[in-house]
């Protein structure tokens, strides 16, 4: 709403100032008194009057836009907690919170309020295609209300420098029709569809993955890292930086540092080939 | 002419013999040391050049870092730089450009040209200039050099906690940043004090404030801004370093702290900083443009008022760096309005420059080319600034490459291009040779084109969603082409600067000396002889216009023949004239000290204090501190408030002036006053922290907090105030000629001051206030720490005063030390009362 008027306005003013400056350079005063009058009125009109009027108008307009964009509560609330260097996402479900990570599902056309927190360092939540950003500051809870209008998958980034892997702290926002969105939330609310004797789950637990990651419906309850209950249904791995494929996942587990320097997850490069295959196969089934 | 005799007796007829003898004596007195003693020099022309070259050296270093950044980002998924190194490189790039180039270069240029523009022989505290320079080099090398050890700061140039307060997240680099820069900030403030006093007190006779060149006005305004802007950052640095080194609780929300406090303190500094960088460049333009259009600036008073208005407004808009922190709408609206408003006085200054050009016929030259380029770039940066000052727009653009583009348009257009114009313009002033016109045009066009190719697309990169401070990005984000274009532009820009640098450094033995006043300028610095002389000005003229060389025909000859004031150095002492603040009436002759190594020693020792503290080598820190204090005392003892061998001297044209001054007439008193204003500002940074916590906490002090013991706070207050009272009484007794009684009081005062420190500390220590427990305890302790430091310094000064009195340097008439230290104690008393009120009264009122 603000962008193009501002750009065009700035372009016009810039050109105007340059034309005046060029005129000032080229012209040679013939009648000094007249030129002096011209010079003084130039300062008065160009330096004082014009900017005052333009800026006052602009400010009023900006404040009205500000009121419209920040006022109001969304119909739904999504809690997003910034972590080094990924995103903890919690929806309000009918039967309690629905935990997910690094991907946010939103209904098109409905205002959504994001409740933004962090407990390590300052992050900033930004989905450029949908709206403005808001910082996530330890000790504070900030709110940001946005209304996505178009369906599709949009990129989100961390906009505040948050340490080593700041550049790779990304996420995806999936905007769908409200009906489809409701179905998605219902699916996310369900525990993982895993048998107790799943061989992949055994590898997962034996190697201590469950100490950091939770998979609802299994004994894995870790809260340090992202919730993996519906891992395979996400579009990306490692907070928005790679597409989820079995081969990428395998490389990630063996050496997270190679894909995302600074990541906290330890390297599991001593898994046997068989265990690794079982683990990857298991994770890829968590839809 | 108000207050100045218009009917001065004529100068004695010209006598070549006398002229020759005077010149020889002046030369002997002012000649700088050569050979291995070169570093002992304190003349402003030497120190100014060192400062300038060093600052440009850091600029080149930071510029190379910028090219490394651009190389890394040229293509997606690049691995030219590792993540760790990239984070260090971008942090150091911003830090160095801001702290080691943009502000020091203002001070460097001012130290170099201000005295000559004022027709002064030097600045009033030449040794302070040298000291400030050495602090700057040592601190700068320490901060910049850290990258060669992989230990450079990596938390961004804004150092936001909790990232920056967590030692596991950000290593020694953050300490290097905090302590190294604090050290440099002290030097910056020292230079600001020097420049303010220089403008106020060392103007030539007759140069009333309204006749002062615009450049000097800007130096005054910017010096004042430094005085109010840097101290809050020093306060913030203190808090952050205390949290890092000793785990005091200021920014940790779990212990009652708040990371946002740092952002306030940082941006209260950080935003005025932008105008501290920008205004001096307008000042350079205001020096260049009149010369090349051959007429005075249009709207002289408009420009001065606008500069002052910008200075004031710049302190009221820091929150626009924090629009995305979730502040209430009303603050956003207020700071958005203030941010827009600053564009108005800025516009006035720019239109005054354009109007001046309109009034005259422009002489085509390289400096004017740079001025034109600066205008085009800066106006564009200003317009994008108007955009980001609108909150809804900013929430989109903030921390994206749009802001990177915006800030480079304002800083490079508003600072670097005018500075480059200034280099071409003042180079003949400093070196009596001109830079090449052809090379200059190449440099300009490469820089101008390269700059726009690099930074114009960056606006769009930001709109496309690329955040700042990312070390890499993937191809599918769609930012690759824009980034590649920016990188190409950056290298073209660098090539342009390289041409300029090469021309500056190229040996010019075969180029002819310039003629005198080679550009036909109107201000006094161009009255200097060619080849130049170390004495600054042959004789100090009476000024009757804003452009003395234009307004007073024949003035150069009069200066040269020694027809004006102070044409001689009969006693072989370095002398300069001190005039009064408003009307520039001659008041007395100030004798300034000559070459010395003491300042270098003091700077090295003080540098060691900061460097050893970085590594927590406390014993070495303490030893260095003792050496630093001793060196400073030695320097003061032998260089300041020296007794003249006679009370007054004849300075020419029928005028006789005193050789000593104390109290508000003296430059030392002004320096103390101005320094203490800055000091109080830093203290108010700590007071701000106290009230900030009060506003964010429902219970402050917290329910379970241990409270300072009121009775001991009262004792401490009483002791400190009595110590202050004794200082006042000692001054009166001294003036009344009762030296013995005065000395007894000066002997007792420091003991009371030390006892006051003990009482205040005990008031917190006994009830076990633990600064690592809660922000309340930490804030109380840091207030007492600050107060204790000031009382201890005050006690040392009282003892110094006593020693000076016993040694015969403080007498009934010559009492500058006593008066300056009493002035210090006025401020110390205010600090004591406020600290007492915050600790004892304020919690009781809640």
Image (cartoon, rainbow, N blue to C red):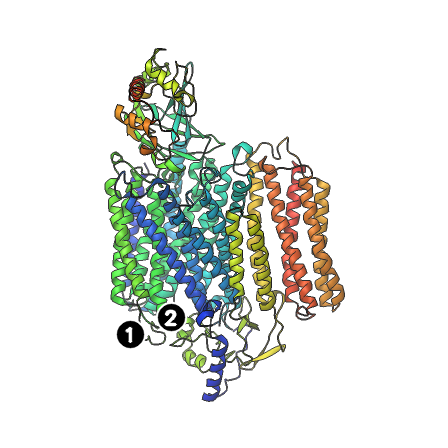
Question: Badge 2 is on which residue?
Answer: B429
Going from N to C along the chain, the mark reached first, 1 or 2, is 2
The x, y position of residue B832, in whole percent, is 65, 49
Give me the residue at 59% from left, 64% from top: B634
Numbered tag placed on residue A185 in the rendering? none
Q: Is A256 rendered above or below residue B827?
A: above
Check the residue under mark 2 and report the chain it is in: B
Q: Are marks 1 and 2 in contact (CB under 8 Å)?
A: no
**How many residues crowd around disc 2 within 10 Å: few (fewer than 14), some, or many (20 or more)?**
many
Q: Is residue B155 visible?
A: yes
Disc 2 secondary structure class: helix
Q: Is residue A41 visible?
A: no
Numbered tag placed on residue B510 in the rendering? 1
Give me the residue at 47% from left, 74% from top: B543
Q: In this orientation, which residue lies closer to the viewer: B619 or B833?
A: B619
Disc 1 secondary structure class: loop
The x, y position of residue B842, in whole percent, is 65, 40
Q: Is A60 rendered above or below residue B654?
A: above
The x, y position of residue A202, in whole percent, is 36, 15
Q: Give the spatial CA distance, label 1 vs label 2.
A: 18 Å
Count every numbered label the image shows and give the total. Answer: 2
Q: Quadrant of the C terminus of chain B?
A: top right
**How many residues crowd around disc 1 within 10 Å: few (fewer than 14), some, or many (20 or more)?**
few
Check the residue under mark 1 and report the chain it is in: B
In the rendered structure, the answer to whether residue B277 lies left or right of residue B494 reads right
Quadrant housing residue B697:
top right
């Amino acid at each position: 709403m603000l962008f193009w008027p501002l750009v065009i306005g700035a372009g016009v003013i810039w050109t105007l100032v340059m034309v005046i400056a060029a005129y000032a350079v080229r012209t040679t005063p013939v009648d000094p008194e007249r030129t002096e009058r011209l010079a003084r009125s130039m300062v008065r009109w160009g330096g004082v009057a014009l900017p005052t009027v333009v800026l006052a108008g602009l400010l009023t307009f900006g404040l009205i836009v500000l009121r419209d964009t920040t006022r109001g509560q969304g119909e739904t609330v999504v809690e997003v907690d910034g972590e080094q260097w990924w995103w903890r996402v919690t929806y309000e479900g009918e039967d309690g919170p629905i935990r997910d990570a690094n991907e946010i599902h939103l209904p098109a056309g409905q205002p959504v309020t994001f409740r933004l927190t962090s407990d390590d360092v300052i992050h900033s939540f930004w989905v450029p295609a949908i709206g403005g950003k808001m910082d996530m500051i330890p000790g504070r809870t900030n709110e940001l209300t946005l209304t996505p209008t178009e369906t599709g998958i949009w990129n989100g980034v961390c906009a505040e420098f948050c340490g080593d892997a700041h550049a790779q702290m990304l996420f995806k926002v999936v905007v769908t029709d409200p009906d489809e969105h409701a179905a998605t939330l219902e699916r996310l609310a369900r525990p993982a569809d895993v048998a107790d004797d799943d061989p992949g789950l055994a590898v997962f637990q034996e190697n201590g993955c469950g100490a950091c990651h939770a998979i609802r419906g299994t004994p894995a309850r870790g809260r340090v890292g992202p919730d993996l209950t519906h891992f395979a249904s996400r579009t990306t791995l490692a907070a928005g930086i790679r597409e989820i494929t079995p081969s990428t996942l395998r490389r990630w587990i063996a050496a997270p540092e190679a894909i995302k320097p600074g990541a906290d997850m330890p390297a599991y490069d001593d898994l046997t080939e068989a265990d690794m295959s079982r683990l990857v196969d298991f994770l890829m089934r968590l839809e | 002419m108000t207050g100045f005799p218009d009917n001065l007796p004529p100068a004695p007829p010209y006598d070549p013999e006398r002229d020759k003898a005077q010149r020889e004596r002046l030369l002997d007195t002012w000649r700088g040391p050569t050979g291995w003693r070169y570093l002992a020099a304190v003349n402003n022309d030497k120190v100014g050049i060192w400062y300038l070259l060093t600052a440009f050296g850091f600029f080149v270093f930071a510029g190379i870092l910028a090219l490394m950044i651009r190389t890394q980002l040229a293509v997606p998924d690049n691995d030219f730089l590792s993540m760790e190194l990239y984070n260090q490189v971008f942090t150091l790039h911003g830090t160095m450009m801001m702290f080691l180039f943009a502000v020091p270069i203002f001070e460097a240029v001012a130290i170099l040209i201000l005295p000559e523009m004022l027709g002064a022989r030097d600045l009033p505290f030449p040794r302070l200039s040298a000291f400030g320079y050495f602090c700057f080099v040592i601190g700068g090398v320490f901060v910049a050099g850290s990258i060669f050890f992989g230990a450079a700061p990596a938390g961004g140039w804004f150092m936001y906690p909790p990232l920056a307060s967590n030692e596991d997240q950000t290593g020694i680099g953050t300490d290097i940043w905090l302590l190294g820069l604090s050290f440099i900030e002290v030097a910056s403030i020292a230079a600001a004090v020097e420049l303010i006093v220089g403008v106020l007190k060392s103007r030539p006779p007759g140069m009333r404030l309204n006749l002062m060149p615009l450049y000097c006005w800007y130096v005054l305004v910017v010096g004042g801004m430094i005085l109010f802007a840097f101290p809050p950052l020093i306060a913030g640095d203190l808090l952050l370093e205390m949290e890092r080194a000793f785990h005091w609780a200021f920014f940790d929300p779990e212990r009652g702290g708040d990371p946002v406090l740092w952002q306030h303190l940082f941006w209260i500094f950080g935003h005025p900083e932008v105008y501290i960088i920008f205004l001096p460049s307008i000042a350079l333009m205001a020096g260049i443009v009149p010369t090349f259009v051959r007429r005075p600036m249009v709207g002289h008073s408009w420009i001065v008022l606008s500069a002052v208005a910008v200075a004031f407004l710049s302190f009221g808009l820091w929150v626009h760096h924090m629009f995305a922190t979730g502040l209430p709408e009303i603050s956003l609206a207020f700071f958005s309005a203030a941010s827009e408003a600053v564009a108005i006085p800025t516009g006035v200054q720019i239109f005054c420059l354009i109007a001046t050009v309109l009034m005259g016929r422009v002489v085509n030259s390289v400096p004017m080319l740079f001025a034109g380029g600066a205008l085009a770039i800066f106006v564009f940066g200003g317009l994008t600034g108007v955009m980001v000052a609108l909150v809804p727009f900013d929430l989109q653009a903030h921390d994206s490459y749009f802001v990177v583009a915006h800030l480079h348009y304002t800083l490079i257009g508003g600072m670097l291009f005018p500075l480059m114009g200034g280099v071409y313009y003042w180079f003949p002033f400093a070196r009596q040779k001109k830079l090449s016109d052809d090379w200059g045009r190449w440099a300009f066009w490469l820089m101008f084109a390269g700059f726009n190719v690099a930074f114009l697309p960056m606006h769009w990169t930001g709109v496309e969603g690329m955040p700042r401070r990312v070390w890499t990005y993937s191809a599918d984000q769609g930012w690759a082409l824009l980034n590649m274009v920016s990188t190409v532009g950056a290298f073209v820009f660098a090539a342009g600067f390289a041409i300029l640098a090469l021309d500056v450094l190229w040996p010019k033995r075969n180029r002819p000396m310039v003629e005198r006043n080679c550009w036909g300028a109107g201000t006094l610095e161009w009255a200097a002889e060619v080849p130049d002389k170390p004495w600054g000005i042959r004789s100090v003229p009476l000024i009757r216009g804003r452009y003395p060389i234009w307004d007073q025909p024949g003035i150069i000859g009069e200066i040269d023949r020694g027809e004006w004031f102070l044409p001689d150095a009969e006693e072989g002492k370095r002398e300069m004239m001190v005039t009064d603040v408003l009307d520039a009436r001659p008041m007395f002759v100030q004798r300034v000290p000559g070459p010395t190594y003491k300042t270098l020693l003091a700077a090295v020792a003080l540098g060691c204090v900061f460097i050893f503290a970085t590594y927590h080598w406390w014993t070495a820190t303490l030893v260095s501190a003792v050496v630093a204090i001793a060196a400073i005392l030695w320097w003061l003892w032998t260089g300041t408030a020296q007794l003249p061998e006679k009370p007054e001297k004849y300075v020419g044209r029928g005028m006789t002036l005193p050789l000593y001054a104390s109290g508000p007439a003296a430059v030392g008193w002004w320096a103390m006053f101005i320094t203490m204003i800055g000091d109080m500002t830093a203290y108010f940074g700590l007071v701000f922290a106290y009230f900030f916590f009060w506003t964010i906490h429902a219970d402050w002090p917290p329910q379970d907090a241990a409270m300072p013991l009121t009775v001991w706070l009262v004792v401490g207050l009483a002791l400190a105030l009595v110590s202050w009272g004794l200082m006042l009484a000692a001054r009166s007794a001294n003036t009344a000629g009762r030296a013995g009684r005065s000395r007894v009081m000066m002997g007792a005062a420091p003991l009371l001051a030390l006892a006051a420190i003990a009482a205040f500390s005990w008031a917190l220590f006994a009830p076990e206030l633990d600064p690592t427990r809660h922000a309340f305890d930490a804030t109380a302790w840091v207030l007492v720490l600050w107060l204790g430091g000031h009382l201890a310094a005050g006690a040392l000064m009282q003892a110094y005063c006593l020693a000076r009195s016993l040694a015969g340097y403080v007498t009934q008439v010559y009492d500058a030390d006593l008066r300056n230290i009493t002035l210090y104690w006025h401020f110390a008393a205010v600090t004591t009362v406020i600290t007492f009120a915050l600790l004892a009264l304020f919690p009781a009122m809640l």
